[in-house]
Image: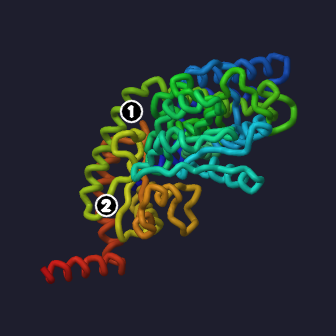
């Protein structure tokens, strides 16, 4: 079998074996609906509550502050639409950033069509917002601040605790999409001063279609889904018992060795960054220091991202250009536009996202295979030809 290096863990991960083992009984010989009272049901209920405790422990919350959902997208939708409904008498203004995931960005755009007003804070070249801009954007009718903990495309980690402190001081509810952070960097809801936090199972080796919303004690958002009243009446639908169990097991596993795994990942990432930024006309995107340990993201001038991803695939490398959610569209990603990259440069983006399963050999393989791919694409590019001709002409004119 030819070698495959999976470097797209920010899009999704392989399911952890530990999580699968924890899930198996609930997929095979345990039919329990967690809302029934006979033994099967009680066992399912116990397993769900056990997973809730694990999730709570991983993010520094109390179990009763954790609500299970179908994933990051649902958690984001619920948090934002829930606050809007809860605070409908207070105002119609929301503050967010230009670099949110579509699960947040498109929810906000939907609300704008309903008459809400959204201030999208600008970011600098590294994807960071300014706290002064945030303070200046706050109005008496601001009901929600929603800022992601870490960006999925460029890996930048935002100053969530500081943002949360400002929100708290002004009495504004604060939500963070922490889907890329939970299980990857330390996350603690009280240190971060958040009221609401979204997480997703399949970004840390849990099953797809699982997630959770942290809701601070005392806060009770209206339900997004009406029905049987599961999750203490606010998230109806028969509990996804195997999914919830898998999410809990995967998160417990991911956070158990977090310090060590972050160190190892950051070292592999740095080796990749050093190796690939040695290619001419290449830059790292995102904050060079405050970034997720596993995300290495680049732009290569005069390279077309989708062709690069296809050619890398032929070499057994799974990476992504822009985010998986927006590929298929020809516009460069809103995140790369927001950090000020010109269109033609933003088109040549590549994100390599690592996790615990990646090895040193994977990094060596990436460093061996990627540079010739870039060279080959540039050799076919009229933009590159023009650029080189321009440089030669300028040199001759000297
Ligand atoms: C993947 C992702 C989501 C969506 O989560 P799903 O569980 O796939 O719905 C939301 N926000 C960020 C930052 C993500 O990376």
User: What's the residue at 70%, 36% (across, down)?
Assistant: 69
| Picture coordinates of residue 50, whole percent (x, y) | 65, 19
Residue appearing at x 48%, y 26% in the figure? 255
Q: Is mark 1 within 8 Å of ligand 1?
A: no
User: Badge 2 is on which residue?
Assistant: 282
Q: Which numbered circle lies on residue 166? A: none
Question: Is residue 258 depicted above or below 339 in this figure?
Answer: above
Helix, strand, or loop for circle 1?
helix
Give the residue number, with chain letter if any, for mark 1.
Answer: 262
Is there any visible trace of residue 321 in the rendered image? Answer: no
Q: Is residue 213 left or right of residue 60?
A: right
Looking at the rendering, which quadrant does residue 394 occupy?
bottom left
Mark toward the start of the polypeptide (2 vs 1): 1
Say whether marks 2 and 1 touch (CB < 8 Å). no
Q: Given this view, does label 2 or label 1 mark the residue nearer the observer?
A: 2
Q: Give the farthest residue toward the left.
A: 398
Above/below status of 383 relative to 60: below
The residue lying at 67 percent from left, 30 percent from top is 244
Callout 1: 10 Å neighbours few (<14), some, many (20+)? some
The quadrant of the picture occupied by the C terminus is bottom left
Q: Nearer the viewer, residue 69 or 3?
A: 69
The image quadrant in which ligand 1 is located: top right
Q: Give percent across and percent down for residue 175.
A: 62, 36
Left/right placement of residue 319 relative to residue 193 reads left
Q: Is residue 179 visible?
A: yes
């Amino acid at each position: 079998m030819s070698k495959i290096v999976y470097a797209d863990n920010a899009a999704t991960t392989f399911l952890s074996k530990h999580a699968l083992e924890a899930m198996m009984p609930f997929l095979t010989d345990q039919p329990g609906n967690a809302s029934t009272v006979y033994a099967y049901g009680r066992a399912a209920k116990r397993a769900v509550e056990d997973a809730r405790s694990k999730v709570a422990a991983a993010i520094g919350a109390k179990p009763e502050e954790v609500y299970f959902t179908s994933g990051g997208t649902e958690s984001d939708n619920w948090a934002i639409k829930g606050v809007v409904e809860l605070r409908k008498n207070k105002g119609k203004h929301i503050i967010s950033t230009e670099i949110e995931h579509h699960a947040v960005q498109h929810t906000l755009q939907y609300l704008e069509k309903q008459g809400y007003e959204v201030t999208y804070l600008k970011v600098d070249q590294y994807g960071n917002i300014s706290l002064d801009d945030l303070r200046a954007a706050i109005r008496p009718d601001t009901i929600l601040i929603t800022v992601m903990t870490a960006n999925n495309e460029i890996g930048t980690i935002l100053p969530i605790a500081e943002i949360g402190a400002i929100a708290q001081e002004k009495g504004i509810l604060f939500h963070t999409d922490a889907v890329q952070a939970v299980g990857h960097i330390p996350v603690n809801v009280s240190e971060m001063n958040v009221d609401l936090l979204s997480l997703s199972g399949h970004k840390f080796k849990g099953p797809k279609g699982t997630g959770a919303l942290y809701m601070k004690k005392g806060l009770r958002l209206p339900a997004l889904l009406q029905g049987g009243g599961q999750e203490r009446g606010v998230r109806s639908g028969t509990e996804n018992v195997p999914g919830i169990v898998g999410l809990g097991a995967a998160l417990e596993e991911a956070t158990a060795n977090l310090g060590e795994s972050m160190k190892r990942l950051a070292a592999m990432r740095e080796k990749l960054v050093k190796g690939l930024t040695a290619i001419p006309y290449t830059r790292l995107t995102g904050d060079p220091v405050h970034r997720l340990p596993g995300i290495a993201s680049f732009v290569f001038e005069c390279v077309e991202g989708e062709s690069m991803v296809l050619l890398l695939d032929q070499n057994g490398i799974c990476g992504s250009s822009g985010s998986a959610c927006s590929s298929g569209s020809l516009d460069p990603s809103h995140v790369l536009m927001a950090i000020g990259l010109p269109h033609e440069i933003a088109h040549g983006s590549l994100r390599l996202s690592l996790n615990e399963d990646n090895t040193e050999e994977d990094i060596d393989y990436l460093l061996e295979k990627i540079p010739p791919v870039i060279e080959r694409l540039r050799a076919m590019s009229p933009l590159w030809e023009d650029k080189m001709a321009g440089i030669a002409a300028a040199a001759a004119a000297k």
